Image (cartoon, rainbow, N blue to C red):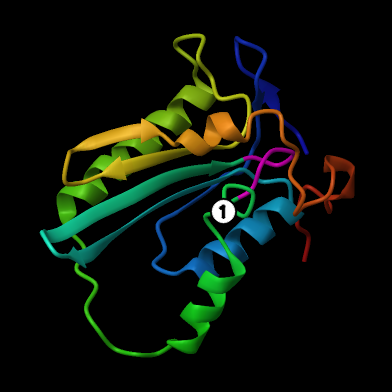
């Protein structure tokens, strides 16, 4: 796969996948495809939950880089979530999506992407990263999981040499 490097020496791939899908299953499929073909995957998502005090808005921005931690490592994708979702596949029901949280998540993802390909400061993510969004408090922070998992290798996908061809050919 042809690539280039940033002024800071970082890898800039030719292809990226950016998504904002509604289901864990779709995220799982996209991440697997991206890992197979050595493609960085940038995902955003949010949900609204009913709570005793009203509603809770929560979201995430997730950057999954080949050779780094995956969504399963961060415990974001879990077998029980995928199974629960599969059991309720096709059920109708509103999950209200609000424009301002989606705007905040999308803007953060665009900023992260721009930082990776055109770094304007020294704090470029060295691997996968997850941001947590609290729509009730209007805050976006790097997930505490990033620090907890520092130095841990991904146990769900093989080493980079175990991935498939970098370019798909029909």
* 10 Å crowding of disc 1: few (<14), some (14-19), many (20+): few
- Residue beneath label 1, please? 75
The answer to whether residue 5 is left or right of residue 112 is: right
Q: Which residues are magenta?
A: 65-70
Given residues 130 and 164, the one toward you in this image is 130
Extreme residue toward the front, this view: 52
The answer to whether residue 155 is left or right of residue 80 is: right
Who's the residue at 78% across and 39% down the image?
1
Q: Magenta stretch containing residue 49, yes or no?
A: no
Who's the residue at 77% across and 66% down the image?
170
Who's the residue at 37% across and 41% down the image?
132
Given residues 115 and 46, the one toward you in this image is 46
Up-down relation of residue 48 to residue 87 (above or below): above
The answer to whether residue 151 is left or right of residue 136 is: right
Q: Quadrant of residue 139?
A: top left
From the top left corner, tell me how far across and down residue 143 is, in percent.
44, 36
From the top left corner, tell me how far across and down residue 90 is, in percent.
40, 90
From the top left corner, tell me how far across and down residue 140 is, in percent.
30, 35
Instruction: Tell me the SS state at disc 1.
Output: loop
């Amino acid at each position: 796969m042809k690539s280039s490097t940033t002024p800071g020496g970082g890898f800039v791939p030719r292809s990226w996948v950016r998504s904002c899908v509604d289901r864990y299953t779709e995220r799982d499929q996209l991440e697997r495809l991206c890992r197979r073909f050595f493609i960085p995957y940038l995902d955003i998502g949010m949900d609204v939950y009913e709570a005793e005090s009203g509603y809770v808005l929560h979201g995430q921005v997730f950057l999954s880089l080949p050779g780094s931690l995956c969504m399963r490592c961060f415990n974001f994708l879990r077998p029980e979530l995928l199974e629960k979702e599969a059991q309720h596949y096709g059920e109708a029901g509103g999950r209200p999506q609000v424009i301002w949280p989606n705007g905040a998540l999308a803007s953060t993802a665009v900023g992260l992407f721009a930082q990776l390909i055109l770094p304007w400061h020294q704090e470029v993510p060295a691997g996968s990263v997850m941001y947590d969004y609290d729509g009730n408090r209007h805050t976006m922070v790097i997930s505490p999981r990033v620090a907890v998992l520092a130095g841990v290798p991904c146990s769900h996908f093989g080493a980079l040499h175990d991935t498939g061809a970098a370019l798909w050919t029909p």
